[in-house]
Amino acid sequence: MSRGARILLVEDEGALARAVARRLQRDGHVVVTAGSLAAARDAVDKQAPDLLLLDLNLPDGLGLDLLAWMQDERGIQAPALVMTAYGELDDAIVALRRRAVDFLRKPVDLDHLCRAVGEAVRGEAPRRPGAPDRASGATVLIGESPAMQQIRHELARVAPLGRGDAPPNVLITGETGTGKDLAARALHEASPRAAEPFVQVDCTALPGELIESELFGHEKGAFTDAHRARDGLLAAAGEGTAFLNEVGELPLSLQAKLLTALESRTIREVGSSRSRPIAAWFVAATNRELDELVAEGGFRSDLYYRLHVLSLRMPPLRERGEDVIELARHFVADTAGRYGLAAPEVTAGAEAALRGYHWPGNVRELRHVIERAVLIRADQRLEAEHLQLTPDVAEPGPAADATDNPTLAGQERALIEATLAQTDGNVSETARRLGLSRGSLRYRLDKYGL
Ligand SMILES: Nc1ncnc2c1ncn2[C@@H]1O[C@H](COP(=O)(O)OP(=O)(O)OP(=O)(O)O)[C@@H](O)[C@H]1O
């Protein structure tokens, strides 16, 4: 059984398509190539892809039309990686709304492409018609620990407050990978706004100048590439929920504009002199300690107070007791199901290793560890060694112990240092082990001068 994904590569430049296909096949993926929209539609109808790798300009139309057709006409929500050339800004924004998971700048760097494909395949389960879709009311937060029961209780208490013209803003905090995104979706689905859109804005996904038009929209001609006027995501959320993910990363210049939007419940599009009302419920999330960021001058205190009228703190996985086992079993079954494998039995030894590990990257790290174990290692039984958990991190050693620097920042720094040492300074591997994106790790390396 193949451990790779089925990838539909839609690219009309033959030489580039062949090079990309060869490289992805070497990584174990099954690649189907299409040089036009018509060929791509045929390919999708023969077999839905797990991942779409999409060029924007095709001989018979726009690549994004294919994404829209797949989602709207065929109900296929496979993740998409979009290859863009300079000057295709508007299209990139549409792609983002269509939940494209990443952009690849042309000319495409093959190593980067393979990494992005790997991340997209691991990070997003293929969603086909009939399969549970998180956006359609099926968000499930797994875990019966007291900490998770408390979160469910708080979600149930806060959700009804989302009604009305000026609902209280909600801030979800917690370490990376603790399920803040999932909690925001669950909140929306349990709220009176459930039938309206849930629009996620990832404040780290785009460079500063793009986030502004992405959030607030722009007038035609507001900047060089603004060939058409376009609504921003805050307006696109309509009467639903606007989820501001990683709000701590928002540049200071935009924090003032967001504050005005939250206070006045109006937005001003880039290039416009008029304000227009917005109706969305604002839910924000961050894995940064916003109060510390405020003290350091990196986040406006007025915005901080405005955002956390209500707050929820997602507990780290290490404080959720037996949830780690329940989650692991769920991820084993999910990975096996997705790749058509028999689900291996999780042995008592593997369970002990899962309980003993510190999980700095929380549920996301657990999910990656289990997926790797199921795909690469385990056959009928998933043993402790298949998990490849590093004992130094499982039992915090002197560097990670950081008893002489008991602050959270001190602990974080020590953990990053320890993991860097274990990986011989390999930043990508360190990010993977800690369950961070490379961008988040790079930010922390700069912050701690490592
Ligand atoms: N309680 C849970 N039950 C099932 N899956 C979970 C749970 N919590 C997290 N996950 C899964 O773990 C991964 C990370 O979750 P999510 O993206 O919500 O975390 P996050 O806190 O928003 O992370 P970050 O701070 O890095 O943005 C996702 O694949 C999510 O589906």
Image (tube, rainbow, N blue to C red):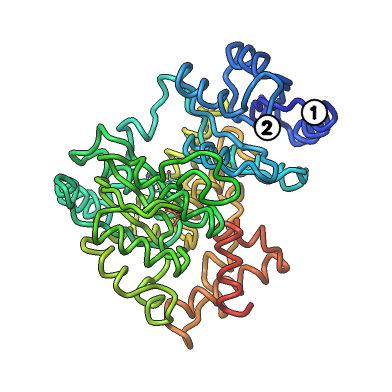
Amino acid type indicated by mark 2: Asp
Query: Can you tell me whether the CB of the residue at mark 2 lies under 8 Å from the nearest atom of ligand 1?
Result: no
- Secondary structure found at label 2: strand
Amino acid type indicated by mark 1: Glu
Q: Are marks 2 and 1 in contact (CB under 8 Å)?
A: yes
Q: Considering depth in this image, is 181 or 107 the residue closer to the camera?
A: 107
Q: Where in the figure is residue 64, as x and y percent of width and height?
A: 57, 29
For the point 39% across and 78% down, the residue is 292
Q: Is residue 330 left or right of residue 397?
A: left
For the point 42% across and 80% down, the residue is 297
Q: Is residue 284 left or right of residue 128?
A: left
- Secondary structure found at label 1: loop
Figure check: 181 above or below 440 = above
For the point 52% across and 29% down, the residue is 126
Q: What label does residue 55 carry, if any?
A: 2
Q: Where in the figure is residue 30, as x and y percent of width and height?
A: 71, 25
Q: Where in the figure is residue 57, as x and y percent of width and height?
A: 68, 29
Label 2 neighbour load within 10 Å: few <14, some 14-19, many 20+:
many
- Quarter of the image for residue 9 reads top right
Q: Considering depth in this image, is 369 or 291 the residue closer to the camera?
A: 291
For the point 24% across and 59% down, the residue is 264
Q: CA distance from mark 2 to mark 1?
A: 9 Å
Query: Which residue, given by chain and number where applicable, does mark 1 sit on?
Result: 13
Q: Earlier in the sequence, mark 2 or mark 1?
A: 1
Q: Is residue 433 left or right of residue 114?
A: left
